[in-house]
């Protein structure tokens, strides 16, 4: 199962370029549930409208944002929407 629904990318379609699904933080060694999406791109290899996604728990959001900002890669941070809550059904309790 693909945990990302990246839809159409691009400035006009940025809303559909958000990741969805149950996932964990991208910080090495962290297994906490993702709460945030850090959208970024590398202008040397990606087109300006392309967005790569790192997921973050609340504890690692600031560290990951700083990492990307220091390298000039960070674009924006948005809330992570879990598929099970995004469509109105209760979240899966099994972790």
Image: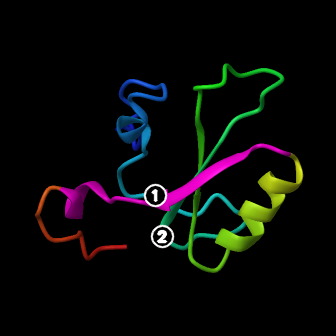
Q: Residue at x 40, y 44 (%)?
A: 3
Location of the N terminus by quadrant is top left
The quadrant holding residue 82 is: bottom left
Location of the C terminus by quadrant is bottom left
Position of residue 34 measured from the top left corner of the image (x, y, whole percent): 49, 65
Q: Earlier in the sequence, mark 1 or mark 2?
A: 1
Residue 72 placement, left or right of 54: right
- Against 4, residue 82 (above or below) is below
Taking the view exactly as shown, the residue that stands out farthest to the left is: 89
Position of residue 61 measured from the top left corner of the image (x, y, whole percent): 65, 70
For disc 1, the neighbor class at 10 Å (few under 14, some 14 to 19, many from 20) is some
Labelled pair 1, 2 in contact (Cβ < 8 Å): yes
**Helix, strand or loop for disc 1:** loop
Find the distance from the CA under tag 1 to the CA under tag 2. 6 Å
Q: Residue at x 60, y 52 (%)?
A: 76
The magenta span reads 72-86
**35 or 27, which lies in front?**
35
For disc 2, the neighbor class at 10 Å (few under 14, some 14 to 19, many from 20) is some
From the image, tell me which residue sits under label 1. Answer: 23
Q: Residue at x 48, y 25 (%)?
A: 10
Taking the view exactly as shown, the residue that stands out farthest to the right is: 70
- Tell me if residue 28 can be seen: no
Position of residue 73 measured from the top left corner of the image (x, y, whole percent): 77, 43
- Tell me if residue 3 can be seen: yes
| Image disc number at residue 33 | 2
């Amino acid at each position: 199962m693909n945990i990302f629904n990246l839809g159409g990318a691009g400035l006009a379609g940025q809303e559909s370029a958000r990741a969805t699904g149950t996932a964990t933080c991208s910080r090495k060694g962290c297994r906490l549930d993702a709460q945030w999406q850090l959208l970024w791109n590398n202008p040397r290899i990606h087109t300006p409208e392309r967005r790569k996604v790192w997921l973050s728990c609340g504890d690692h959001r600031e560290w990951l944002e700083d990492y990307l900002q220091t390298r000039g890669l960070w674009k924006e941070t948005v809330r992570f929407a879990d598929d099970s809550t995004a469509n109105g059904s209760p979240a899966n309790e099994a972790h």
